[in-house]
Amino acid sequence: MLQTKHYFHEMETIATKSVTKGRSNNKLSKTIHKLTTLNFASNNALFFLTTHETKAHHHQAKNKNEEFKARTRRRAVMEALIARLFAGVTTIKASYAELQMAQQPYNNEAIQKADQAVVDELISISELKKRYLKKELNISSPQVTLMLAEVQEQQSLMKTFGITIQKLQSLVDTKDSEISSLKKQLHECTAFNKSLEKKLHSSASLSKFENLHLSALNTTHFIHSLQHTLSSMKSFTKLMIKEMESSNWDLELAAKCIQPDAVFIKQNHQCYAFESFVNMTMFEGFNIPSEPLEKHHNRNLYLENFKRHKSLNTKHYLSAHDPNSSFARFLKSKYLHVVHEKMECSFFGNLNHRKLLKLNNGGVPDSAFFVAFAEMAKRVWCLHCLALSLDEDVRIFQVKKNTRFSEAYMECEAEQVVSTSSEEVTDSDSGELRVGFTVVPGFMIGKSVIQSQVYLSPVS
């Protein structure tokens, strides 16, 4: 009985504990459920709040990006517009330069073309201005427009530079033409002055040497005598060429025999080869005294010889005086060297001139050809005596072939050669005038120089 009570008591206690425990668990569950529900609601509210802020930020960033793109495009459009304006201005400048260029020489077609180009570009710029003010610039691709504007500007600049080069080249050509004209005038004036000088010297009478004393002798007297001598030598050369033509000589071949490497600018310049031959032969040994005179009396005796021979009749002198005198020997020797046997035979059909001179009996040929030669020889002899009479040494010189032309020591014998050959020589590598051969030797009297006369040939 007691055990049964005890058992029921324990069972009742357990049941009470179970009920108490159950109530306690139920409260805990409710509390947890409330907490869970509150936490979920809080998280859900936070989620909705975060999503809204993200959308707002994203929208704001998108607006900024679009605004940046719009600002960048506007800037690109303005750059393209400005580039287009500069290109247009450059095009107008180039077209205006073309317009000016077409004025002289006058080119109506080019003027109209350039004028239309200016008008077209002004219209194009005016249209750009209108669209800009109305904010209707339809530039779909600013980058392409910018590049095209740069290309247009560069092309216009190149055109302007090309026109500038043409203007400068035209100016250079004009100046070159003026220089050539002035050079030609200078050359003509120089040639005219030389011709006047030669006429003055040749017309000057030798009578001024009549009362000439050794103390008054100077270079001017030698120059006057030289001009007389050269005039006589030129006259004899012309006579010799005339005789050669009458005897059917091949003048070109004969000139080539005298100057094998000479290049003649004109056919009639072959006469300078014959003149060179005569002059060089007659002046050979010019500095050598003709007689072993005493040194103390040298100058006086040579001056007296000059005075005695300058006005005499050569033919009469040779007939009346010693045929073995210094002058007679000089004349005979020079004739035999200048007039070859074949030449004399072709002129006269025989060699009587040579035979008569070699007899040494005072007989002299009476042909006009020999008289002209004797007159030339007399003047060379007188010049020789006058040179040996001077206080200063007289030296004769000739210019070597291919020597550069120098006005200090040379003058051109053929005036035509200077202008003609200068053009041809300009096309050569050296661009310099060169001496073909010496026509008349030069003289040096102390420090004074009498120019050598040379024939200039184009540089080969």
Image (cartoon, rainbow, N blue to C red):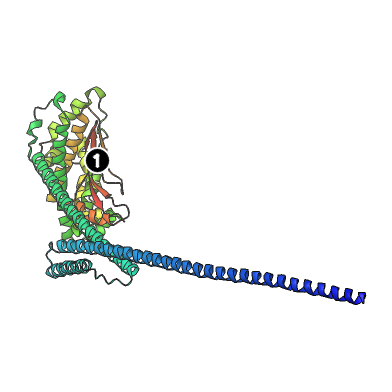
- Residue 363 visible in the displayed image: no
Helix, strand or loop at mark 1? loop
Is 13 displayed left or right of 84 in the figure?
Answer: right
Against 32, is 218 above or below? Answer: above
Q: Quadrant of residue 266?
A: bottom left
- Residue drawn at x 13%, y 31% as measured from the top left: 307
User: Residue lying farthest top?
Assistant: 296
- Return the residue nearer the eye: 60 or 440: 60
Please provide percent x and percent y for residue 421. Answer: 23, 54
- Return the residue nearer the eye: 274 or 149: 149
User: Residue lying farthest front?
Assistant: 1
Against 335, is 138 above or below? Answer: below
> How busy is the neighbourhood of tag 1: few (under 14 within 10 Å), some, or many (20 plus)?
some
Q: Quadrant of residue 214?
A: top left
- Return the residue nearer the eye: 174 or 459: 174
- Residue 22 visible in the displayed image: yes
Is 208 displayed left or right of 339 in the figure?
Answer: left
- Return the residue nearer the eye: 73 or 55: 55
Please provide percent x and percent y for residue 144. Answer: 33, 69
- Disc tally is 1
Q: What kind of residue is marked 1?
A: Tyr
User: Which residue is denoted by mark 1 in the rendering?
Assistant: 409
Quadrant into which the N terminus falls? bottom right
Please provide percent x and percent y for residue 272. Answer: 21, 52
Quadrant into which the C terminus falls? bottom left
Against 291, is 410 above or below? Answer: below
Please provide percent x and percent y for residue 298. Answer: 22, 26
